[in-house]
Amino acid sequence: MTRVQANLLLLLAAAIWGGGFVAQSTAMHSIGPFWFIGLRFVVATVVVLPFAWLEARKAAAPLKPKHMRAFILVGLALFGGAATQQIGLQTTTVTNSSFITGLYVVFVPLIAVIFLRKPPHWIIWPAALMALTGIYLLSGGALSGLSVGDMLTVVCAVFWAIQITLAGIAVKETDRPLGLSATQFAVTAAGGLAFAIVREPISLDVIRAALGEILYVGIFSSGLAFALQVIGQRYTTSSQAAIFLSSEALFGAALGALLLGETISPLGYIGCALMFSAMLVVEVLPELARRRTAATS
């Protein structure tokens, strides 16, 4: 798979996640956040597990204990991000949530520099700033009063940055994207159900009322999109992946406007253009530099 194809996979994952913001928001009318997290990731685990089993059968060697520990750490980061985002959606809008979640576009290269001592390609920094500005303009150039939900979503963005970074490392070391997906989904499902049993009431009527959202988010936003993420990250860097994945804010705001009546201002359209420009420069400039280097060598 080429880097261009990998980045297109990440863009598709972002589009699916954008739709997931709407489903996650409407589900809160019927079911508690932890039951929703637990059930959506049970569905995701069931969807991915057969493919992970086939992948394991074809693998040249079994996973080492250190790799399983890495997969579990990715799952814990995913659970932290899912929990803070889902609880945050109880007191913030889809547009605000998608904007604030997009802060991981800045946190990912910071993690690479501070903890991994791996400075990204220089274009990542201006592209991250362009994407972040685009997300901000997409929100209308102002957040509608920072709520508890907004602050929880900032924490969510940190967890997503950790998940993107750790997933990128784990999948390149093991070449087992579906095994990683199944493990992180199972860990997140277990965490969600454990908290839900202690904290939230449940009934069959509640599950039935939110079943459409659970199935959409479980099959597509979780099972498919996260699998696309870890597959795509085999062929690109975590910092570049963050740029493409941040376009979920664009899709989330657009679908929030279409399905929930939330509005996109004229500034929002400028934000869309900035985000697409950021994705374009991240894709084109490193490729041009690579070709120049190859031509002179």
Image: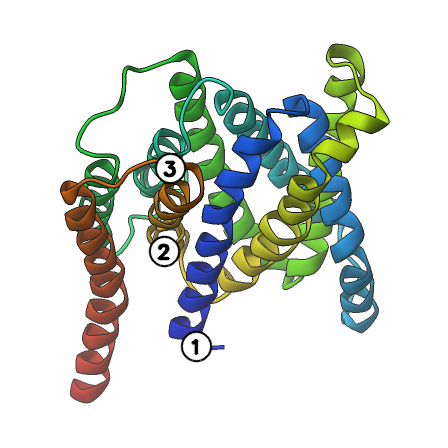
Residue 50 x, y percent position in the rendering: 82, 61
- With respect to residue 73, does 231 lie above or below? below
Pointer 3 residue? 261
Q: Say whether residue 122 is visible.
A: no
Query: Which callout, 3 or 1, points at the residue further toward the start of the chain?
Result: 1
Q: CA distance from mark 2 to mark 1?
A: 15 Å
Helix, strand or loop under label 2 = helix
The amino acid type, in three-letter code, at marker 1 is Thr
Front position among marks 3 and 2: 3
Label 1, residues with CA under 10 Å away: few <14, some 14-19, many ≥20: few
Q: Residue 207 is drawn in which quadrant?
A: top right
At label 2, which amino acid type do we have?
Phe
On the image, numbered disc 2 is attached to which residue?
Answer: 244
Q: Is residue 116 left or right of residue 58?
A: left
Residues packed near mark 2 inside 10 Å, few (<14), some (14 to 19) or many (20 plus): many
Count of numbered marks: 3
Question: Residue at image x 20%, y 34%?
Answer: 140
